[in-house]
Amino acid sequence: MSMNAASSSNNTVISVAHLAKSFGAAKAVQDVSFDVHAGEIFGLLGPNGAGKTTTIRMILDIFKPDKGEVSVLGGPMSEQKKARIGYLPEERGLYKDLTVEQCVTYLAELKGVARADIKTRAARFFEQFDLTEHRRKKINELSKGMQQKVQIISTLIHRPALVIIDEPFSGLDPVNTRLVQDLLLEQRAQGTTIIMSTHLMYQVEEMCDRLVLIDHGKTVLYGGVDEIRRSHADRAVRVVVRGDLPAIPGVIETSRKGNERTLALPHGMEPQEVLAALVAAGVPIEQFELALPTMDDIFVKVVAGGK
Amino acid sequence: MKKILLIALREYARQVVRKAFIGVLVFPLFIIAIGGVVGYISASATINSDRGVVGYVDPGNALANAARPPADADNTFQKFDTAEAAQTALEQKQIIAYYALAPDFAVSRQAEFRYWQNEPGRSVRRAFEAFARSALLADLPPATATRLIEGATFTQTTLDGSRAFDENNIMSFVLPFIAAILFIIALFSGASYLLQAVVDEKENRTIEIVVSSVTPMQLMSGKVIGLAGVGLTQILVWLLGASAAVFLLRDRLEFLQGIAIDPGFVALAFALFVLQYLIYGAIMAGIGSIVVDARQGQSYSTPFTLGAMIPWFFLTAILFDPNGVIAVVLSLFPLTAPLTLLVRYSMTSIPAWQLAVAIGLLILTAIGAMWLAARIFRIGMLRFGQRVNLSEIAANIRF
């Protein structure tokens, strides 16, 4: 795990090194460091009050850090760079007295998009999000879910190179959650870098390439999602076989859920040895995998362990 | 700059379509319109009742040589041989009034003015006085007689010639007062719109999205400029309404005829408005960013609003001694300067150094207030649901 942002490469879109920020006596962020690479979905995780939002605000130059360095798109934040960033904060809202069209247009104009482009891009988004017939309605006439969709459109309409999105799925039903998820994956496929803060750990597993976990204002976990899961894996394998499972020397069966058994390995024993023993015993193997912990397990373990 | 303009335009557009703004806009026009209609009707009624033949009984024949007014004048004069004949004509409404002159009128100047029910206006008496004087001046050349009858108009001018008070032009004295009142209304409505706009932006949680596109300073500047536009629109609409009323009524209402707008005064009022608006705009934006809701904002802004009203409380002192210590101090203190200067403008010639110092201090205060407000704005804008206390502001303002 590297905590040193100075080792950033050309591939780095955001580099955060030893950030700290206090409000009065409250230390919101104490020491946070991470790099975000181009074209990845990066998870910014942490329990409530960990300092995620303050970190994002320092990245966006809304707050000035007390200590530490932030580099965004190759240097300090500038007005031109703001036009290349899409931001959907956790505390988000829209101008309730404007129509959907007016609101999207105003926010896109602030990002420097020409009116003609806004019109065509907005029409496409409205179509995609099923908002075409609601585009002339005032924001306060829309349901919370629809407002959320308008917010996501406003975040993406200027085709940002970097998207920072805080809890993108809050307030969305499963259909729209899938819609937004697909949209973010589509953005990544087009080369957009995405920083996503979420409490939904299965979304992190499904979507994020890498992540940082912040707790009490400090980086406590940082790296690739698979790498982190592997490094937190207990020494165990999950096995599904047809018929009875033969006894494998040294291995203890710890749990059984339907046909799936979890086998704990003693220190020094490799999973390959279990596989070899099963093959040697001639048991038909239907499934054999490392028993990786879920991100949820890791999150709870790391955060609870820190207390 | 483009972003500031975009924000300004949006704030402007958002405010001017509000019912409350349209109400503020229309209310004084409505008052002017009502006043105009009432004035017009009463003026017409007065004029109509004052038009007509005025009789006179002149036993000493003192007015034999008087110059007859033209037939289309508002009042013509008819001689009656006896008071009884004139009284009968009055009762039959053939004449609107009559003068019964003493037999020795040429010497004693004694005459009785008699009318039926309603007393005719001053114009009738003035017309008859001119008619009577013309008899005494009959021997003089006509031009001299006319000058004597018309008399003189005195204009008081200050030593440096910068201010003149024409006794026929009462409006030159009244206008600065009206301007001061309009000024204060437009200033405070603009400032309260601004406070509301900042609180709204916080309340509906759009502020963080916007500051990811613009700097807090740009956001605040855009709002201040857009709402200054709203205040100026308000003044402009009122002035246009008042001008239209003056234009329509100037033939009917005598006091309107002497109206002359002093360009120096307009320029001063405009400069003062812009500067004080910037100061109040900054104060309101700062307050808006640290409070939780509009009600709390109002209670925070009241001391500042009262500050600008201080000249009203000292109005008597300023009017009695427009160059006294109180007037000068209030002219130099930035929060009270604009209103004091506007009121003093009608009373005196304000020394140039005082104007220069007052405006200089206003400019410095405006810059300082904007700078400070931008910093407070940065601290307070993202604090949702809790107010920011003063010690926190002091600790986070970086010089």
Image (cartoon, rainbow, N blue to C red):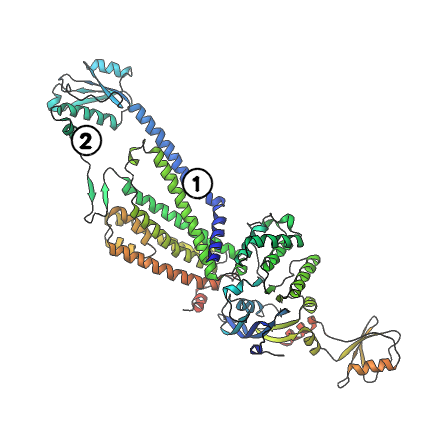
Mark 2 burial class by Cα count in 10 Å: few <14, some 14-19, many 20+: few
Task: Out of A197 and B232, give the one closest to the viewer.
Answer: B232
Q: Identify the residue at horizontal 45%, vertical 61% (top origin).
A: B217
Quadrant of the frame with the C terminus of chain A: bottom right
Q: Identify the residue at horizontal 29%, vertical 14% (top origin).
A: B92
Residue A17 visible (yes or no): yes
Task: Out of B284 and B391, give the one closest to the viewer.
Answer: B284
Q: For mark 1, name the chain.
A: B
Residue B295 visible (yes or no): no
Quadrant of the frame with the N terminus of chain A: bottom right
Mark 1 burial class by Cα count in 10 Å: few <14, some 14-19, many 20+: some
| Image x and y of residue A185, in percent | 67, 64
Task: Out of B26 and B386, give the one closest to the viewer.
Answer: B26
Q: Which mark is residue B26?
A: 1
Judge from the rendering whether residue A14 lies leftward or rightward of residue B297; answer left or right: right
Under tag 1, what secondary structure? helix
Under tag 2, what secondary structure? helix
Q: Which mark is residue B312?
A: none
Quarter assignment of residue B60: top left
**In the displayed structure, would residue A281 be above or below residue B311?**
below
**In the displayed structure, would residue A288 be above or below residue B83?**
below
Amino acid type of the residue that numbered disc 1 sits on in the rendered structure: Val
Disc 2 to disc 1: CB gap under 8 Å: no
| Image x and y of residue B159, in percent | 18, 48
Judge from the rendering whether residue B261 lies leftward or rightward of residue A84; answer left or right: left
**In the displayed structure, would residue A33 be above or below residue A164?**
below
Q: CA distance from mark 2 to mark 1?
A: 42 Å
| Image x and y of residue B47, in percent | 30, 26
**In the displayed structure, would residue A81 be above or below residue A114?**
below
**Residue underneath mark 2:** B150
